[in-house]
Image (spheres, grey):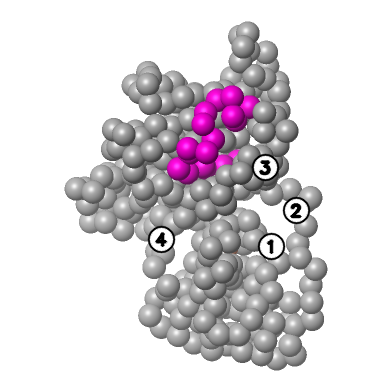
Amino acid sequence: MARFHTLRVAEVDRLTDDSVALTLDVPPELRPEYRHAAGQHLTLRRTADGTEIRRTYSICSPAPGPGEDGPRTLRVGVRLVEGGAFSTYALKEIGAGDELEVMTPAGRFTLDPAPGLYAAVVGGSGITPVLSIVTTLLAREPAARFCLIRSDRTAASTMFLEEVADLKDRYPQRLQLVTVLSREEQQAGLPSGRLDEHRLTGLLPSLLPVAQVAGWFLCGPFGLVRGAERALRGLGVERTRVHQEIFHVDGSAAAAPASPAPARSTVTARLDGRGGTWPVREGESLLETVLRNRPDAPYACKGGVCGTCRALLVAGEVRMDRNFALEPEETEAGYVLACQSHPATERVELDFDR
Ligand code: FES
């Protein structure tokens, strides 16, 4: 069950003009709760002027090993979003010694270290969870290799440039690094320009044996992730080998058309071992209904992107506005995003504990 705790900021490192890495200390008694897999994220919460805001940031530090009780520190990358309430605060105000409210780790964009070849296509801040995945994999699994293809505007705007270069120095044989800059010329032979489906369809087979890749990790803006997914599908890669996490969704990703909801619906929800049944008000999402009665219900983005509000649909049917977080296997298994779900039957039952 997701919970918030207060953690102290140990360090704030400036990565680029518009991004920082926040290192948080985890006291010994909380380490088991913050045990995380490589690729998971944290939700940070802040109340300003009476309004609560939550934002999800990926953990870039490696996952704790099997023998450790949990991480001593957690590091997340934060990039400034224009007008972003939390990112502006993170870049301009947060300093060492400050305290932040931090949810326990969540997310299924993860890799358990195993032998084999893995690859990632990332854009911009999409490097953040993949940095944790690559670092953890190469340190723990000597028979694993990784091909990291990253796309950024310029070298100066590239997050974790040094960290990735250090990894390349440490594992020159096992890490293949390809950097594509869209707004800057590179040395001869290196690709530049935007990475889209067409470019990737040509580029990927020239870089690595596509059919032998055990797991693909796509992370970044909506357009890049969708383009990479289509390129992989065109190259015959099975869907089950492709994991994706979208960081920004723009207006072009339209919501599903609304269909009329039953006149009086109720939602029954089980959360942290306790259940309740409440009427759903017209137009509200199931998450909003549950939150009115159970303020501890898990959520972060409320936009169908982060997956924090995932719940199992135990009974009834729902209509989801949009879903950029759940894999097809999860929706087939009956999981829904509560923040995007509206009742399509009079009774709906959700389980947040499974
Ligand atoms: S809260 Fe982020 S997907 Fe629902």
Dot 1 lies on which element?
Answer: loop
- Give residue 347's mark: none
Residue marked by disc 1? 322
Disc 2: CA contacts within 10 A as few (<14), some (14-19) or many (>=20): few
Q: Mark 2 and mark 1 in contact? Answer it, CB < 8 Å.
A: yes
Mark-to-mark CA distance, 4 and 1:
26 Å
Q: Which residues are magenta?
A: 203-221
Cα–Cα span, label 2 and label 1: 9 Å
Residue 294 visible, this angle: no
Rounded to the nearest whole Å, what is the CA distance between mark 2 and mark 3? 22 Å
Instruction: Report how far apart the C-alphas of labels 4 and 3 lie in the structure.
Output: 42 Å
Residue receiving disc 4: 4
How packed is label 1: few (under 14 Cα within 10 Å), some, or many (20 or more)?
A: some
For disc 2, the marked residue is 253
x and y percentages locating residue 257 in the rendered image: 80, 68
Q: Who comes first in sequence, dot 2 or dot 3?
A: 3
Residue on which disc 3 sits: 234
